[in-house]
């Protein structure tokens, strides 16, 4: 007995529909698996050694702490926004002035690291403020290495420390060893860099869990104040300092 054509067409159509649905479901599952694998690779969660790079700027990536310091999965690279780069390049420009921070007319061998103790009170205050700033910059290395784990920040903090400690070392040899022009340029640019950082914090509502937001703002503000204090002391106080350090 022959089957009716309508039933034959219905069966064929149902077979086609079911095949299309199965193919569509398989495609969606395959796409989802591919996307999941790609996300896992970017986060270093599938056993690979891929560094995590987010699609947009984020304040922190705490999962980096789940891996060792020598594991690339324990580090990440942030796509820093405009104001973050303004701060970075402003401070890099400040570092360049450190290369000429020593006065060409005086040799360090003619002085010692205790020469600063013979200077006036204003200069001693400059040295003290710079020493405190340098000390906390050392702590910044530990923070980037053990907690934050962001590669650009880590690459920044080492030369920043080197620049500040180089300035302090030169300051310890007394005011006559310093080139006033380069010394002040360094301080001004570092001050502008921290002002840029505060703008960056405000624009992007920067906040990390390890430190309260107001404490983060306060820390950067204190650094800006430190540079401003040193500049004020250098410009306006200590007649003996002004005489000892000739503008070059």
Image (cartoon, rainbow, N blue to C red):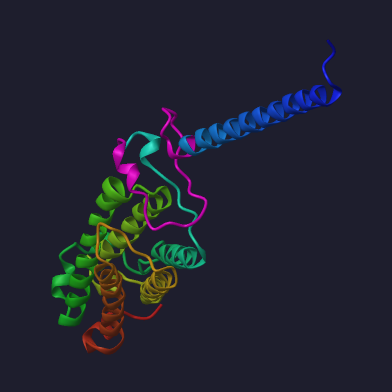
- Magenta region includes residue 57: yes
| Magenta stretch bounds | 41-68
Q: In percent of the image, x 41 and y 27: which residue is there?
A: 47
Q: Residue furthest top?
A: 1
Task: Report which quarter residue 243 is drawn in.
Answer: bottom left
Q: In percent of the image, x 41 and y 47: which residue is there?
A: 151
Q: Position of residue 212 (x, y in %)?
A: 25, 65
Q: Position of residue 40 (x, y in %)?
A: 46, 36
Q: Nearer the viewer, residue 69 or 132?
A: 69
Tell me: residue 236, above or below residue 138: below
Tell me: residue 54, above or below residue 126: above
Q: Is residue 39 left or right of residue 101?
A: right
Q: Position of residue 136 (x, y in %)?
A: 22, 61
Q: In percent of the image, x 59 and y 30: which residue is there?
A: 30
Q: Position of residue 46 (x, y in %)?
A: 43, 30
Q: Residue furthest front?
A: 1
Q: Nearer the viewer, residue 124 or 95?
A: 95
Q: How many marks?
A: 0
Task: Report which quarter residue 95 is drawn in.
Answer: bottom left
Q: Main secondary structure of the magenta part?
A: loop
Q: Nearer the viewer, residue 56 or 2?
A: 2
On-image quarter of the N terminus: top right
Task: Report which quarter residue 49 is drawn in.
Answer: top left
- Magenta region includes residue 55: yes
On-image quarter of the C terminus: bottom left
């Amino acid at each position: 007995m022959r089957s009716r054509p309508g039933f034959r067409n219905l069966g064929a159509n149902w077979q086609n529909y079911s095949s299309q649905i199965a193919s569509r479901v398989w495609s969606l599952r395959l796409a989802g698996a591919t996307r999941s694998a790609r996300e896992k690779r970017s986060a270093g969660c599938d056993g690979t050694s891929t560094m995590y790079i987010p699609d947009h700027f984020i304040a922190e990536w705490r999962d980096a702490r789940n891996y060792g310091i020598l594991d690339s999965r324990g580090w990440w690279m942030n796509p820093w926004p405009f104001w973050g780069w303004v701060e970075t390049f402003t401070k890099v420009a400040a570092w360049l002035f450190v290369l000429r921070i020593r006065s060409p007319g005086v040799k360090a061998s003619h002085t010692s690291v205790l020469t600063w103790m013979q200077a006036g009170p204003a200069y001693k205050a400059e040295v003290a403020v710079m020493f405190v700033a340098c000390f906390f910059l050392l702590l910044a290395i530990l923070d980037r290495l053990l907690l934050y784990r962001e590669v650009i920040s880590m690459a920044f903090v080492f030369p920043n420390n080197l620049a500040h400690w180089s300035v302090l070392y030169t300051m310890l040899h007394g005011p006559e060893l310093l080139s006033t022009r380069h010394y002040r340029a360094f301080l001004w640019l570092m001050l502008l860099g921290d002002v840029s950082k505060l703008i960056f914090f405000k624009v992007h509502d920067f906040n990390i869990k390890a430190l309260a937001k107001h404490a983060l703002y306060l820390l950067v503000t204190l650094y800006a104040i430190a540079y401003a204090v040193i500049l004020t002391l250098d410009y306006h106080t200590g007649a003996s300092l002004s005489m000892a350090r000739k503008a070059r």
